[in-house]
Amino acid sequence: MTEPRLRLRLHFGPGSMFGPGRADLLEAIAAHGSISAAGRQMGMSYRRAWTLVEALNAGFSAPLVDSSRGGAAGGGAKLTAEGLAVLAHYRKLEMTLAEAGAAEIAALQQLACAIPTRK
Amino acid sequence: MTEPRLRLRLHFGPGSMFGPGRADLLEAIAAHGSISAAGRQMGMSYRRAWTLVEALNAGFSAPLVDSSRGGAAGGGAKLTAEGLAVLAHYRKLEMTLAEAGAAEIAALQQLACAIPTRK
């Protein structure tokens, strides 16, 4: 059995949330330079990817994704300085917490079902 | 604005997960001695609460909730030793991680939207 996966979600207030799916989407946008290509990689519809980007841009004090290069030509997208900062802080938080919580996570893993197919 | 809320979800493998909702449900069962009363407190249907308890009991190497006192009389429920252990480890993990991640969480909070009503 693989290590348990720790998923962190931060709720900053109404309408402002950040978690693993949004972090992955930002990373994919940075990698592909395109919201639609990022969405495709993550198996989500174009519309869903855009809705998430809009939520991300509205939920922080500055937009996280710059899609101003879009338009008639199809365009592209990139992370803003704020987007890069949010992503970096979140990834660092994940690492810090996986380390700090290692003992408790191992204890919970011991109690969890060892055989995935168990009913 | 209140502190950002950190929500942790652990995925141990297929069908075995533990997160804030399940922790709250276990706590409510311990407090009320009843699955249905716990569900009511959490605003979930009787059926939903039972389904979650069944998933919890199947997802760990031993049941977390003992509802054997149920039956014709309506009965009650309590946490098993394993249920108490899982809940205690999870709550300790939450505290440990909130402390260990304080700097990164504060940095993310700074970047998050300060005005919840902002569009």
Image: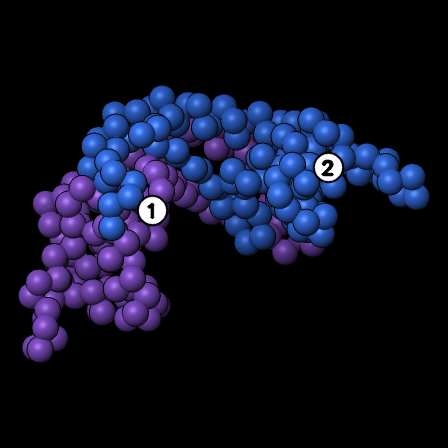
Chain colours: A purple, B blue
Q: Is residue A3 above or below residue B93?
A: below
Image side of residue A91 versus residue A6, left or right: left
Q: Is residue B71 left or right of residue A50?
A: right
For the point 28% across and 71% down, which residue is it? A46
Instruction: Give me the residue at 42% from left, 23% from top.
Output: B96
Say which residue appears at 25% left-offset and 33% top-offset.
Answer: B109
Residue B103 lies, in percent from the top left, at 25, 25
How packed mark 1 is, by other alpha carbons closer than 10 Å (few <14, some 14-19, many 20 or more), is some
Chain letter of disc 1?
A
Q: Position of residue A88 (x, y in %)?
A: 20, 41
User: Where residue A21 sits: x, y (%)?
Assistant: 34, 53
Q: Position of residue A82 (x, y in %)?
A: 14, 44
A76 relative position to A9: left or right: left
Label placed on residue A15: 1
Q: Nearer the viewer, residue A17 or B114?
A: B114
> In which quadrant of the rendered view does residue B33 lie?
top right
| Quarter occupied by residue B108 | top left
| Residue assigned mark 2 | B37
Residue B73 relative to residue A11: left or right = right
Looking at the picture, tell me which residue is in the foreground, A61 or A102: A61
- Amino acid marked by disc 1: Gly
Q: Is residue A56 above or below residue B68?
A: below
Q: Which mark is residue A76?
A: none
Q: Amino acid at mark 2?
A: Ala
Mark 2 crowd level (few <14, some 14–19, many ≥20, 10 Å Cα): some
Q: Are marks 1 and 2 on the same chain?
A: no
Please identify the residue farthest to the bottom as the structure is shown. Answer: A72
Q: Chain of mark 2?
A: B
In the displayed image of the protein, which residue is found farthest to the right? B72
Give the quarter of the image for residue A76: bottom left
Measure how far apart labels 1 and 2 are at the Cα level: 31 Å
